[in-house]
Amino acid sequence: MRSNTTMSTDLLEIQGFNIAPSFRYPLFFALLLVYCSLLLSNLGVLLVILTNHALHQPMYLLFCNLPVNDLIGNTVLLPRLMMHIVSGERHISYRQCVVQAFHSHTFGSASHMILIIMAIDRYVAICHPLRYSSIMTSRTVTGLSVTAWGVSIVLVTILIGLTVRLSRCRNVIQNAYCDNASLFKLSCEDISINNIYGLFFTVLLFTSSIGGLAATYIRIALMCWVQKNKELNRRAVQTCASHLVLFLIMIWSGFLTIILHRFPEYPYLRQIAYILLHVVPANLNPIIYGLNTKLLREKIMHLVKRKVTPR
C-alpha cells in the first residue's frame, strides 16, 4: 500500500509490548493489583471526605478533584491494557482510540490545573488566614474546580480535534496505548500544525503550573520570613508539604515522558514511563495527602479502627 493512500478501515492495531506467554499472567495480576489499589485508595478518600461534615472545607473539597481525575485517567487506560496483555489481542477501533487519547490527555492537563488551584487555596490560607472563610467560599471552590476542568477539556478538545481532521494512511499505533502523537502519526498529511499546537499545549501547562506554584510558594516563604512566627512556619510546612510532594511527583513523571519521546530507539521505556505517569501518582496521592493532612488522617484512622475492632 502506498504511503499516500487513505485507510478506509476503522480498526487499528496497537503495537503494545512483546511479552513472553509465561509473563502475561504475572504482569496482568500485577497491573490488576495496582488498579485495585488505586481504586480502593482514591474511592476511600473520596467517601471519607464526602461523608464527614467536618471535612466539607475548601481544602478537602478541592482535593476531591485529584482522586476523581486519577480514577478517570486510569480507568480509561489500565483495563484495556490488561485485556491486551492477557489475551494478546491488540486491536482497537479508531473511535475508541480517540476517546482513550482524549481522556488520557485530559488526565494530564487536569492534574496541572488542579494543583494550581490547590496552590491558590494554600496561599490564601497562610497569607490571609482571617479572610480565608470569606474568600474561599463554596462558590469560589466550585468556580475554581469548573475552571480547572473547563480549561483542560477545551485545550485537549482542540488538541484531539486537530488530529481527527487528518486522513489516515496507516493503521498501526506505535505505542501500547492511544495518545495524540500516536494518532496523528497515522496520517501522511502535513502535521506541522499538530506539532506546533502540541508544543504550545505542553509549554503552557508546564509554565502555568510551575509558574503558579512558584509565585504562591515564594509569597508564602516571604510571609514566613518577614513575620518570623513559629506557628505560621509550622502551619505553612504542614499544609504545603503534601501539596509540594504531589506536584514534584507529577512534574518529574511528565518530564520523564517528554524526554523519552526524544529517544525513539527506546520505545518500551517511553511506554512504561507513560503508564507509570498514570499509576504512580494515582496510588501515592491519597497516601501522601491523607497521611500528611491531620484532620483527614484522623478521620481515615478512626474509620479503619472501627472496621478492624471486633464488636
Image: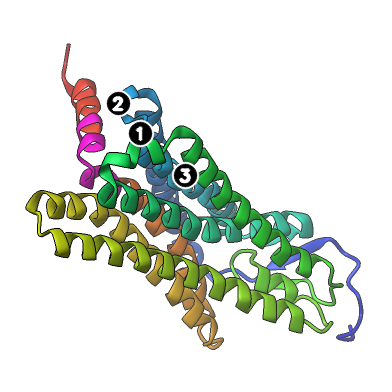
Q: Is residue 6 left or right of residue 212?
A: right
Q: Amino acid at mark 1?
A: Gln
| Quarter of the image where the N terminus is located | bottom right
User: How far from the left and from the top, in percent, is residue 267?
Assistant: 54, 80
Tag of residue 57:
1
Q: Amino acid at mark 2?
A: Ala
Whether the residues at callouts 3 and 1 have beta carbons within 8 Å, the answer is no
Whether the residues at callouts 1 and 2 have beta carbons within 8 Å, the answer is yes
Residue at screen point 81% across, 84% down: 190
Q: Secondary structure at mark 1?
A: loop
Residue matched to label 2: 54
Question: Is residue 269 or residue 304 the one in the foreground?
Answer: 304
Q: CA distance from mark 1 to mark 2?
A: 7 Å
Is residue 103 in view? no
Q: Amino acid at mark 3?
A: Asn
Is 99 rendered above or below residue 264?
Answer: above
Residue matched to label 3: 65
Which of the 4 image quarters holds residue 306? Answer: top left
